[in-house]
Image: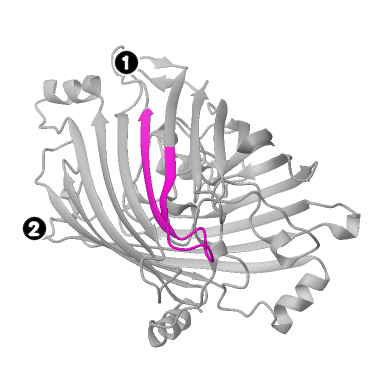
Amino acid sequence: MLTAGLLLGAGILGHAKSNDASQGLPDSPTPAQRSIEDLNYLGGDAAMPPFSDSVIDVDSGFRRALFNKGFAFRVISGLQYTQNMLDAPVPADEQVYVGQRAFGSSFVQPILAADLHQLHLKHAQFYLGGVWNWASWNPAGPKSVQLWALYFYKAYGEDRVELKAGYIANNMSFVGLFVGGSTATGAQGVYAVLPYEAGMSYFPLTAPSFNVRIRGPENAYIETAAQRSQDANGGPAEVARNHTGFRFIPHGDKLVLINEVGYLRAASADAHAAWVRAGDIYNTTPYRNEATGQPEPGNYCAYALMDYQLLKSGREHPKQGLYAGGSFMTAPETLNAYARYYEARLYKEGPLRSRPDDVLSAVASRTGYSRIFTDNLVSEGKTVWRAGTTVTGSYSLRASRGNYLSLGLSYVDGPAITPRVANALNFVANWTLFF
């Protein structure tokens, strides 16, 4: 199915249909009546494209038959390729960053959702998803076939209060790491690893979590989660201990508390989009203290981010236009290899009148590596970078219905903590299909 979809997309690359819902900062869900979009991903700070933006027609017999029973089934699949353009590939046992050798990854993500109207529940959803994830370099994986989502969602008071309970990947619910707020076009470029170091669950990994989001007056909101921590040693260790993703509390993984406050205003004919948020991820799981060598609880990541629509392309499509944003994150140097993260971004939604759903972006970031961690490496006779700086330009295009292609170039100064390898110019390509 994936190969057929890629061939289909290549044949109709230049054809696009306008669809504002797939781009821009995420709106508050406000369904006026029962709709198939009640079965789309709800209650997060990132949006998936609507079912109308799918390789399978929203009015097909398959979609309508399932919807009449209160169900929707979709499959998301993707491919990624990364290659450093400045140097020849190194031997496999010498690779220390993505792109140092030709890197490929792929995923297939089946999702089943039910709106629970048979139980006479409104603004409710049962969500089940799995994932097959593969990467040519395991540290950038993890390679896995496992649960991705299994939770119950319910909204109250015209969606003023939203609850989620179950197995959740919280990178789609907190922080706001997707440029433009869409999973279709927002993952190109940089990678802020600090929230994941602190134990927050992320695709393709999941964890039990209880989330509450409250929308206040004047576009303000607060959101909190109580989540079981990911493994303190990272994604590959998490998969090795929890192959299926179903284990509720693997030994040693304790509680993560995530709290976020923000202001989120959707674009309209009379207002520019704005999104300001700040939060904290606190983990009670013991992490190795690099200064003492002993396990120690209390790891955390504090963050603050902002996105603002500088210019609108027109009143007819208020989400389209020029945006600017910035990010700051910090984590304790004693417990984390990556201790600081700064980012500045500029992106244009609908950069061409004939391409209203494309996104052009320029992102600059700097990651500060832990001084304690790098000093320990130096004492062992190893060479190190103290920080990594990345400048990325990318263009994400909607090739056809449900078919997205992103191409980018990323210059990286300090691509790995150790050894001190040469700078890289990575070519990055992502292809995502929504069935």
Mark 2 crowd level (few <14, some 14–19, many ≥20, 10 Å Cα): few
Q: Nearer the viewer, residue 144 or 53?
A: 53
Residue 297 is left or right of residue 192, and the answer is: right
Q: Nearer the viewer, residue 36 or 371?
A: 36
Marks 2, 1: nearer the viewer: 2
Residue at screen point 34% across, 45% down: 191
Residue 324 is left or right of residue 38, and the answer is: left
Which span of residues is magenta-colored?
306-329
Tag 1, which secondary structure? loop
Which residue in the protein does label 1 denote? Answer: 293
Query: In the image, is residue 326 part of the stretch drawn in magenta?
Result: yes
Tag 2, which secondary structure? loop
Which residue in the protein does label 2 denote? Answer: 87
Of all residues, the one furthest to the bottom in this rendering is: 11
Residue 126 is left or right of residue 303, and the answer is: right
Q: Is residue 409 above or below residue 375?
A: below
Quadrant housing residue 208: top right
